[in-house]
Image (cartoon, rainbow, N blue to C red):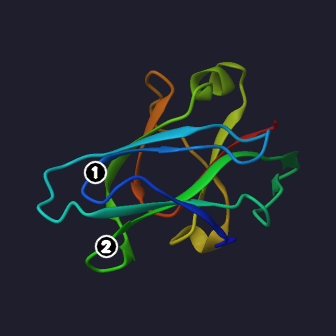
Amino acid sequence: MAKNVLETVGNSGNKKFRIKRVKDTEREADIEILGDDPDSDFEVQKLSVDGLPAKLGDDDILWFNNFSIKKRSSNSFINQSYKVKIVGLAAVRAANKRIVILDGNAVDGIPYVFTGAITDDTIELTDGDPAVGGSPP
């Protein structure tokens, strides 16, 4: 997975972040980190979608956003629940398209289909190094 950091987002101590789009094909993502973690000093970075896999099986992938969430104290990706809101996610699924996740820390860098719930264009993830997209575009 490409690790080209484009921007560090938000202030330390926050649990809510907005990750802006860089390319016209991307979408903004709103992040809300869940839980009562006493070490809630997070760093969120906007990562490039360049170099991400272009296909899921035979279908093309349109990457909506790519980001990372780390705890500043350990400089490691979080492994805790957080919400990601990307406007249009529910419409992607309603159109019988797939929500695609590329988890930079697991699944050997292979995109997979997100099968969890989508509520108000929001999904819940736990790994702090994802890319989120749709397939087919």
Circle 1 residues within 10 Å: few <14, some 14–19, many ≥20: some
Q: Quadrant of the C terminus?
A: top right
User: Disc 1 or 2, which lies upstream in sequence?
Assistant: 1
Residue 76 spot, x, y in % from top left:
37, 77
Q: Determine whether 70 is above or below 10 in the image.
A: below
Q: How many marks?
A: 2
- Taking the spot 35% from the left edge, 66% from the top edge, the residue there is 78
Which quarter of the picture shows residue 94? top right
Residue found farthest to the bottom: 74
Q: Which mark is residue 106?
A: none
Residue indicated by mark 2: 72
Residue 6 spot, x, y in % from top left:
64, 63
- Taking the spot 71% from the left edge, 25% from the top edge, the residue there is 96
Q: Determine whether 104 is above or below 87 in the image.
A: below
Residue indicated by mark 1: 14
Which quarter of the picture shows residue 119? top left
Check disc 1 and report its element: helix, strand or loop.
Answer: loop
Q: Quadrant of the N terminus?
A: bottom right
Residue 27 spot, x, y in % from top left:
66, 37
Circle 2 residues within 10 Å: few <14, some 14–19, many ≥20: some
Relative to the observer, which residue lies in front, 61 or 36? 36
In this picture, residue 123 sits left or right of residue 11: right
What is the three-letter code of the residue carrying label 2? Arg
User: Residues under labels 1 and 2: Cα distance?
Assistant: 12 Å
In this picture, residue 127 sits left or right of residue 21: left
Check disc 2 and report its element: helix, strand or loop.
Answer: loop
